[in-house]
């Protein structure tokens, strides 16, 4: 067992968001909230802006937020001809990390570039830490981390692998700040490679260069995924949950599996050669294997059953088990607690598991923003959490 005192030692010092300020964000023109480091319950009718608050916090971390939304789609719809102060929306926060205070701001700025008779508009996301411009979004991970569950993830074990792969990569980001950069670079290289081949460009030197870069970055992505999955599996084995199901995580990907038996340099050579050979597949719409096709597999240990064959309630419990394990493992690994963003998390959980989850959130003494249309579902946290209510584009303590 992982000794409990280790959690206690880390959690003596608090981490989370103490003040959140939104400008032109979703349904909020301007909003400022003061948060405690602990459970925070946000209730209100559907469509009243509960999830928007969680999404705003998620934008304090690297990436496209918990909805994976396009930057331009987040700005509040108004009749203004121009966005306020030349930005579409902004989120800023005072945060505490191990009892040290920081200020983080992120905004999407709109700019124009004149290409002669073609005027193009660009949306750029800007990040500042303590008033200084950050070179990349990855720097945010040094100050704050977030783990989230949304209703859209209730069906994550069904359908295609892309949502599961994105879920896995977000977990990896939390442990390896460079992973976000790697995945973005690989996506850019892949799109350029695909575009060149599809358009009929026959510059073999250019294509070979892209394939070399893709194989190197791709193997690094696969290696990072393997390391984090192995770390979580070890943690889960040593620290099984007393309520939520024990599980086993696995990667279903050719590159990840090759790293089990081959040196990384040999896998890179294989990957590069396979990309070269697969050029013709683009024209026949055949699947091109690689790290952008890897699947993230989850197994319910007690039943020896893959998650996709489990019931809806069991799947939700498995999902909760993953994020609880990630949270605890991350606390020990990074030395500070992530913020939990739990959107309608009690859906599909029976009363026993619902109350157990709330109890675990409380006992971990970390910040957790939880939403629901039903305030009574959080009765067990009465006098132990902040309660907010949304409505009419406002948020008030309740």
Image (cartoon, grey):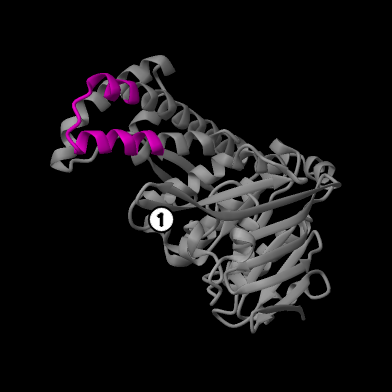
Asked whether the viewer can see residue 353, the reply is no
Does residue 383 appear left or right of residue 67 in this picture?
right
**Is residue 161 shown in magenta?**
no
In the image: residue 326, left or right of residue 215: right
| Stretch in magenta | 187-210
Q: Residue at x 79, y 69 (%)?
A: 385
Residue 356 on image: x %, y %:
67, 64
* Placement of 385 over or under 205, stated as above or below: below
Residue 385 shown left or right of residue 276 in the figure? right
Image quarter of residue 288: top left
Element at badge 1? loop
Compare residues 343 and 311 and report the one nearer the observer.
343
Residue 2 location, quadrant = top right
Magenta span: chief secondary structure: helix
Q: Look at the image and tell me in which quarter the C terminus lies.
A: bottom right
- What residue did someone put label 1 on? 157
Closer to the camera in the image, 1 or 166 = 166
């Amino acid at each position: 067992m992982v000794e409990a005192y280790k959690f206690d030692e880390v959690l003596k010092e608090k981490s989370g968001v103490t003040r959140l300020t939104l400008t032109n964000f979703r349904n909020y023109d301007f909003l400022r909230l003061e948060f405690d480091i602990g459970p925070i319950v946000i209730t209100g009718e559907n469509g009243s802006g509960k999830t928007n608050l969680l999404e705003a916090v998620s934008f304090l971390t690297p990436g496209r937020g918990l909805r994976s939304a396009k930057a331009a789609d987040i700005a509040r719809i108004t009749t203004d001809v121009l966005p306020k102060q030349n930005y579409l929306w902004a989120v800023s926060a005072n945060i505490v990390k191990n009892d040290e205070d920081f200020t983080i701001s992120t905004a999407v700025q709109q700019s124009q570039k004149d290409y002669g008779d073609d005027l193009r508009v660009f949306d750029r996301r800007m990040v500042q830490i303590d008033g200084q411009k950050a070179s990349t979004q990855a720097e945010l991970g040094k100050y704050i981390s977030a783990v989230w569950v949304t209703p859209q993830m209730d069906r994550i074990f069904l359908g295609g692998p892309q949502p599961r792969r994105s879920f896995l990569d977000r977990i990896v980001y939390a442990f390896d700040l460079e992973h976000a950069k790697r995945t973005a670079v690989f996506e850019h290289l892949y799109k350029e490679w695909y575009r060149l081949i599809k358009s009929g460009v026959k510059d073999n030197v250019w294509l070979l260069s892209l394939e070399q870069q893709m194989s190197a970055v791709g193997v690094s992505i696969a290696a990072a995924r393997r390391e984090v999955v192995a770390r979580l599996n070890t943690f889960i084995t040593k620290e099984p949950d007393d309520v939520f199901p024990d599980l086993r995580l696995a990667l279903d990907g050719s590159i990840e599996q090759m790293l089990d038996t081959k040196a990384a340099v040999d896998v890179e050579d294989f990957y590069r050669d396979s990309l070269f050979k697969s050029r013709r597949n683009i024209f026949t719409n055949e699947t091109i294997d690689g790290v952008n096709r890897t699947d993230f597999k989850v197994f319910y240990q007690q039943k020896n059953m893959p998650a996709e064959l489990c019931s809806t309630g069991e799947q939700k419990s498995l999902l909760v088990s993953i994020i609880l394990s990630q949270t605890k493992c991350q606390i020990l690994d990074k030395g500070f607690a992530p913020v939990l963003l739990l959107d309608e998390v009690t859906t599909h959980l029976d009363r026993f598991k619902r109350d157990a989850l709330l109890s675990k959130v409380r006992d971990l003494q970390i910040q957790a923003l939880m939403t629901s249309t039903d305030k009574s579902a959080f009765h067990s946290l009465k006098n132990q959490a902040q309660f907010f209510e949304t409505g009419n584009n406002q948020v008030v303590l309740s």
